Image (cartoon, rainbow, N blue to C red):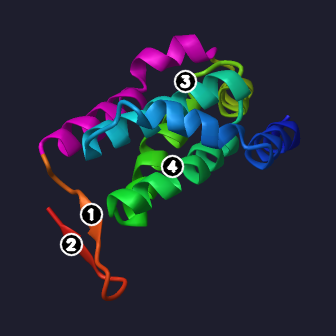
Amino acid sequence: MILCALSFGGVMERCGFLEVLLEAILKHVKSVTGMVVSVIIACFATNLLVGDQYTAIVLPGRMFKPAFDKMGLHPRMLSRTLEDSGTLTSVLIPWNTCGAYHTSLFGIPTLEFAPFAFFNYINPIVAIVLTAMGKFIFWRMDTDDDIITE
């Protein structure tokens, strides 16, 4: 399942589908908060549709990297946002490889333990709120690989 999902992601990138999706999304994005919200939604949607955590990280990551660069954001902002959403929400989806693994490992259906997985669904919300407050935004500097934070 993982190999099929990653193959699907490769085909989408190679055929240029990701660029078309990114253009449609970025028409409405004007701020760093909008960018973070877009990445979180894209990761969650990829988790829902593709059913693989790794694809939900790699696809949006490759898709949004040029937009983060253009906005002047440090790559760690994208990395952190992908982790906040792609990794943490995968266990909450029953047909996702991560959700299916946890169900088979512990013998508890995903929808039974999901209400108690506070960290998994609260963390993306905290990421959006902190970004909207202007906290922990990392900007890229042109001179070297150091960062500027707000």
> Magenta segment, which residues?
109-133
Kindly indicate the quadrant of the structure image that contains residue 35: top left
Tell me if label 1 and label 4 are in contact, CB under 8 Å. Answer: no
Give the structural element (helix, strand or loop) at label 4: helix
Tell me if label 2 and label 3 are in contact, CB under 8 Å. Answer: no
The residue that mark 2 highlights is 148
Q: Residue 132: horizontal and vertical position, in percent?
A: 18, 39
Q: CA distance from mark 1 to mark 4?
A: 16 Å
Identify the residue at horizontal 79%, vertical 49% (top origin).
14
Kindly indicate the quadrant of the structure image that contains residue 22: top right
Question: The residue under label 1 is which amino acid type?
Answer: Phe
The residue that mark 1 highlights is 138
Kindly indicate the quadrant of the structure image that contains residue 56: top right
Quarter holding the N terminus is top right
Question: The residue under label 3 is which amino acid type?
Answer: Leu
Pick the residue in front: 13 or 27.
27
Is residue 11 placed above or below 121 in the rendered structure?
below
Question: The residue under label 4 is which amino acid type?
Answer: Phe
Mark 1 or 3: in front is 1
Q: Circle 3: is it few (<14), some (14-19), or many (20+) Cα within 10 Å?
A: many
Mark 2 or 3: in front is 2
Mark 2 or 4: in front is 4
The residue that mark 4 highlights is 64
Tell me if label 3 and label 4 are in contact, CB under 8 Å. Answer: no
121 on left or right of 114:
left
